[in-house]
Image (cartoon, rainbow, N blue to C red):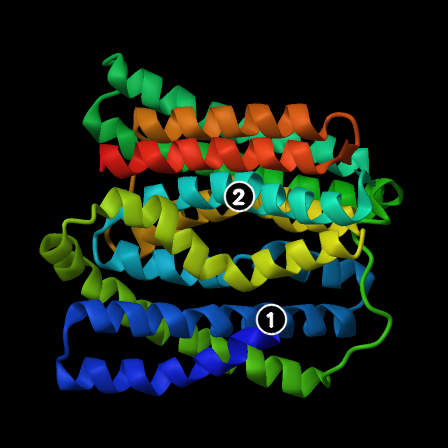
Amino acid sequence: MRCLYPLLLAIPIAVYLEMAGASPLWIFISSALAILPLAGVLGKATEELAIHAGPRFGGFLNATFGNAAELIITIMAIRAGLFELVKASITGAIIGNILLILGLSAVVGGFKNKVQVFNRNLAVMNSSLLFLSVIALTIPAIFVLGGGIEDNELGKMSRGVADILMATYVLSLVFSFRTHKHLFHTAHEVLDEAEWSRNKALTIMILSTVGVALMSEFLVGSLEEVISEFGVSEFFLGIVIIPLIGNAAEHSSAIMMALRNRMDLALEIAIGSSTQIAVFVAPLLIYISYLVGKPMSYIFNVYELTAIALTVLIANIVSSDGETNWLEGVQLLAAYAIMAIGFFYVG
């Protein structure tokens, strides 16, 4: 993550360009570059606070705030009314974490360590939650397309689905961090000692959150003009570019864990992050959209539904035996590349 620190220089550059009314493209690029290290710092501060909080509440902090940077970006997009971008970024984060990041981790770790093993219980739990998210995304879309749901009932159905997913997410935390924590001890291990003090971690977390929010405001504000001027679709930006910006630091952590032959942690970062987005971040965004007065439905298009369903299927196949190798990683990367090409031309 430290290799991203020089990109913090992009923060004052983005502020200057925004105040000077510069080209939206340069504002987009500078704010995106600034978010990369800020997201990493925010994640590091959360981990440090988790160590101070102890294993039980610390695990909850890591599990709940692991995608804070991407959550902030999508909140800004909701405020701007860019619902297609928000839904595409949810889809992109799910498939990107599983196919791209787990794929890269398996390739890099596989070349160095041949075969890598991981906690199969963790993979099974995440796979089950991901299948639940596929159901939650598919059923509302089918009912709407089939004419079984009226427009005035769409909001109630979206909130109902969000309620169920959020409740399931909370219960999954209770299961993995309390009642059945012995099944996940390897995946949930933390550092013995914190590198930062509690006050330092809290201060940095607050400052980095403010920084991510400001840069996200600049990024989202420049999107519409970038889309219209350069012909890049909102759909493609949301499904490929935005997730990479918000999760770059976390992605590098997964790859480093695989290099160290700690595939349990790499798997938790990759698949665990996708699970969190599917059953926590997505329903949370539904609630937030109502709070800001711009209600968003839980209806995803057929391309997004197909991509998520196929991603969950291939993730389940690859992780079912409790081990990975570099060829499985290549297969995941190939699947991601095929989907990315399709999304580019669909957009």
In the rendered image, residue 170, in percent from the top left (x then y), is placed at 63, 44
Whether residue 106 appears in this view of the structure is yes
124, above or below 76, in the image: above
Which quadrant is home to the C terminus? top left
Q: Viewed as shown, does residue 80 lie left or right of 212?
A: left
- Most extreme residue toward the front is 111
Residue 227 in percent (x, y) is at 16, 54
Q: Earlier in the sequence, mark 1 or mark 2?
A: 1
The reply, left or right, for residue 99 in relation to residue 111 is: left
Front in this rendered view, residue 151 or 340: 340
- Tag 1, which secondary structure? loop
The quarter of the picture where the N terminus appears is bottom right
Please state the horizontal and vertical placement of residue 15, each as a whole percent of the image.
28, 84
Q: Amino acid at mark 1?
A: Met
Please name the amino acid that badge 2 sits on.
Answer: Leu
Q: Which residue sits at x=78%, y=26%? A: 321
Circle 2 SS class: helix
| Residue labelled with disc 1 | 1
59 shown above or below 215: above
Location of residue 78 (image quadrant): bottom left
- Is there any visible trace of residue 126 in the rendered image? no
Residue at image position (36%, 44%) is 239
Q: Residue at x 41, y 62 (%)?
A: 72
Q: Which residue is mark 2?
A: 100
Please state which of residues 287 and 316 is positioned toward the viewer in this rendering: 316
Describe residue 5's horizontal placement relative to residue 27 as left or right: right
Residue shown at 53% from the left, 57% from the top: 67
Residue nearest the observer in this picture, 72 or 268: 268
- Say which mark, if any, is on residue 239: none
